Amino acid sequence: MKKFFKNQKGFTLVELMIVIVIVGILAAVAVPIYTANIKKAKMSECDAALGTIRTALRVYYATNDPTPAYPTAAAGTEVSAVTGLDISAADLTGKYFAATNYTLASADTNYTISCTNDILSTPRTLNELGAFGGGI
């Protein structure tokens, strides 16, 4: 009787299981790194928009004659609705946040810009001193 299986080549079950375990380990390492990078991308988008708003507020402050002041806005006022700021909703719309996510609370000499969304665990803020607060 001839042996038909003697010269056949292929992977054994043990070899296949080892490959599956290695792929599982690589996935377990890669997923948290990917998640952290997504969070950083969201914060970067938020911070960039807050910086854009801050620049518009500083221009407004510098060009307000005769006494420099920031526009008065009650807490929760959408930034794109503030009169006098040269900023549009398109300037603030990105992949993760829309213009409606950015609000302003300001008085004559101070302000706080907020970025809120269900993406962020706490609102990300920026004040007139350039100090960031909150976020993921």
Image (cartoon, rainbow, N blue to C red):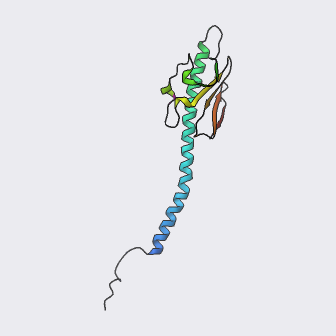
Q: Work out which quarter of the rendered image holds the C terminus and state it.
A: top right
| Residue at the extreme left of the image, as rendered | 2
In the image, residue 30 lies at what x, y percent?
53, 54
Q: Identify the residue at image location x=46%, y=72%.
A: 15
Q: Work out which quarter of the rendered image holds the N terminus and state it.
A: bottom left
Q: Identify the residue at image location x=58%, y=38%.
A: 43
The quarter of the displayed image where residue 73 is located: top right
| Residue at the extreme top of the image, as rendered | 66
Residues drawn in magenta: 92-96
In the image, residue 123 lies at what x, y percent?
63, 35
Position of 3 compared to 42: left or right? left
Q: Identify the residue at image location x=55%, y=58%.
A: 28
Q: Identify the residue at image location x=61%, y=12%.
A: 64
The quarter of the displayed image where residue 38 is located: top right
In the image, residue 82 lies at what x, y percent?
57, 20
Q: Is residue 45 above or below residue 19?
A: above
Q: Main secondary structure of the magenta part?
A: loop
Closest to the observer, 27 or 89: 89
The quarter of the displayed image where residue 72 is located: top right
Q: Is residue 100 above or below residue 16?
A: above
Position of 87 compared to 107: left or right? left
Q: How many marks?
A: 0
Magenta span includes 61? no
Position of 38 compared to 126: left or right? left
Q: Is residue 70 above or below residue 126?
A: above
In the image, residue 69 lies at what x, y percent?
65, 15
